[in-house]
Amino acid sequence: MDIPQFQRLILDWGRQNRREMPWRDTRDPYRILVSEVMLQQTQVSRVLPKYEEFLHEYPNLNALANASQARLLRVWQGLGYWNRALRLRDAARMILNEFGGVFPQDPATLRALPGIGPYTAGAVACFAFGSAEPFLDTNIRRVYLFFFLPGEEDVPDGRVMDIARRAVWLDDPREWGYALFDYGAIELRDRTINRRSRHHSRQSAFEGSFRSYRTQALRHVLAQEGTSLSRAELEGFLAGRLSAEDSSYLPKDVLDALINDGLLKSSPDDRVYV
């Protein structure tokens, strides 16, 4: 398939099947950044209600930059990968303090923000500012693998990006990106296509994982009055969960990981708090 034919196919399909989402109705880079960070490794159906709740609580960079950690994590609760909330707040502070409140527009500068990788930087640059620089996520990569690299194994992203650069619809890169997303998510239901990518990694199951115990511990602290309790109490709470599920993880390891990531803090009197 040549590039013009591919463009026509994707765009025609996209016009008929475009998914409506609130972050697609704005060019506000702050709102788009919030959506893209939330969508990292999280399903759209889970993000939709939390997106509105988050923006109600933190409608702009200033509100987020000044957010207390306890309240921020409570609002984020339900999305998982809690570190994203802290990095998003760090990004808001960096934009205000180092960029004078002016949002970076190019992917290279956006990547300097905490927690922003190549995909998120490219998506924000495209959807907020109309950048024509291509970017890859799981869905978009699957589209290019399916149409241009059938049957090939261990495909590096460099090869995919070479095709993506030639394929961008320059008249409207934003709509092109949405059409690619939706085609990969809806039309290409064979998720094994991505296994042919050198960069493919399967998300591990949540139940019984180290992440699940981190989440249980953090939720327990957030539920406490003052979002604080003794380290012994929290380790005891975790011990009950871990032994009930015959886990090989240790309460101390879970707690130390949360402290090392900055999601919990410890005090000199051996208490932990958000």
Image: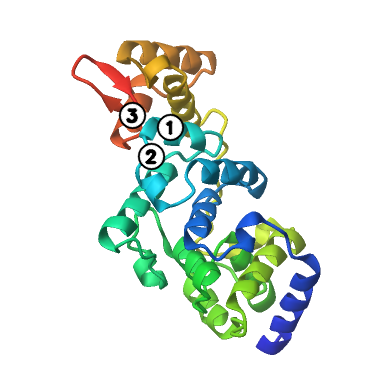
Q: Are marks 2 and 3 in contact (CB under 8 Å)?
A: no
Report the disc number at residue 260: none
Q: How many other residues sit within 10 Å of disc 1, few (<14), some (14-19) or many (≥20)?
A: some
Secondary structure of the residue carrying numbered label 2: loop
Quarter of the picture holding the N terminus: bottom right
- Residue type beneath disc 2: Ala
Residue 241, position as x, y percentages in the image:
50, 16
- Residue type beneath disc 1: Arg
How far apart are the alpha carbons under marks 3 and 1? 13 Å
Please, which residue is most extreme toward the left here? 268
Q: Is residue 93 left or right of residue 30?
A: left
Q: Are marks 2 and 1 in contact (CB under 8 Å)?
A: yes
Q: Is residue 106 left or right of residue 173?
A: left
Secondary structure of the residue carrying numbered label 1: helix
User: What residue do we see at 24% from left, 15% from top?
Assistant: 270
User: What residue do we see at 52% from left, 66% from top?
Assistant: 123
Q: Nearer the viewer, residue 123 or 34?
A: 34
Q: Nearer the viewer, residue 138 or 217?
A: 217
Image quarter for residue 217?
top left
Q: How many other residues sit within 10 Å of disc 3, few (<14), some (14-19) or many (≥20)?
A: many
Q: Which residue is mark 3?
A: 264
